[in-house]
Image (spheres, rainbow, N blue to C red):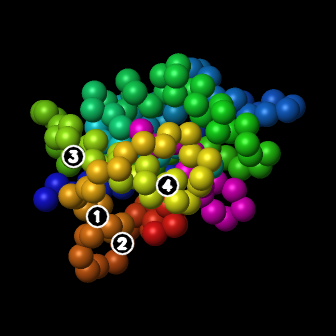
Amino acid sequence: MLSFTVDGPFEVPFYQGNAAKAISSEEARGFWELNPKYEKRRGCYIFAIRAGGGITPIYVGKATRGFKSEVFTADKLAKYQRGLADYLKGSPVLFFLLHPAAKGKPNKALIGELEDFLIQTAISRNSELINVQGTKKAEFNITGVLRSGVGKPSNPARSLKSCLGL
């Protein structure tokens, strides 16, 4: 069984305008300057909003080529903008669910299963989730979050559980 680990939530830099928040490629560069160790890692990620003591998922994605090349693409930034438009208050954050193999070929099938599961779980927490796909039953665990056995979960794992309403 492949065991993904959770890291985050990481604050995503954003521009606060008079009417709305915005995340551009400039803010994305700032994010990677602060978090370079995740640039080449693979797995899944959750873009969410932290507000009022809670965290609400907005978008779930997967990265099989590396987070830096997939998290802040132009189409993803457009999706995040749509998600941010629904929140007057709150700050954008990212969770990373890291594939255990930092190098070499990732297990793309299991990354896809994890993404499907996260989408299913996130949509139950936020019916306005931007992506609504993925129905296959998953066969994996997330350390400290799901099917991971006994033991105290890490702070990032507890935060993700709260974000997803698990």
The kind of residue tagged 4 is Ala
Q: Is label 1 in contact with label 2 (beta carbons under 8 Å)?
A: yes
In the rendered image, residue 11, in percent from the top left (x then y), is placed at 57, 45
Which of the two discs, 4 and 1, sits closer to the camera? 4
- Tell whether 82 sits left or right of 60: right
Which of marks 3 and 4 precedes in the sequence? 3
Could you say which quadrant of the image residue 87 lies in? top right
| Circle 2 residue | 153
Which of marks 3 and 1 precedes in the sequence? 3
| Circle 1 residue | 143
Q: Which secondary structure class fits the magenta region best?
A: strand
Residue that appears at 56% across and 20% down: 25
Report, in whole angstroms, how far the alpha carbon at label 2 lies from the one at label 4: 19 Å
The kind of residue tagged 3 is Leu
Q: Is residue 58 visible?
A: yes
Report, in whole angstroms, how far the alpha carbon at label 4 lies from the one at label 3: 18 Å
Which of the two discs, 2 and 4, sits closer to the camera? 4
Which of marks 2 and 1 precedes in the sequence? 1
- Tell whether 100 sits left or right of 165: left
Which of marks 1 and 4 precedes in the sequence? 4
In the rendered image, residue 80, in percent from the top left (x then y), is placed at 60, 34
The kind of residue tagged 2 is Pro
- The label on residue 122 is 4
Q: Residues within 10 Å of mark 3 (few under 14, many from 20)?
A: some
* 138, 152: nearer the viewer: 138
In the rendered image, residue 147, in percent from the top left (x then y), is placed at 27, 70
- Tell whether 75 sits left or right of 49: left
Which of marks 4 and 2 precedes in the sequence? 4
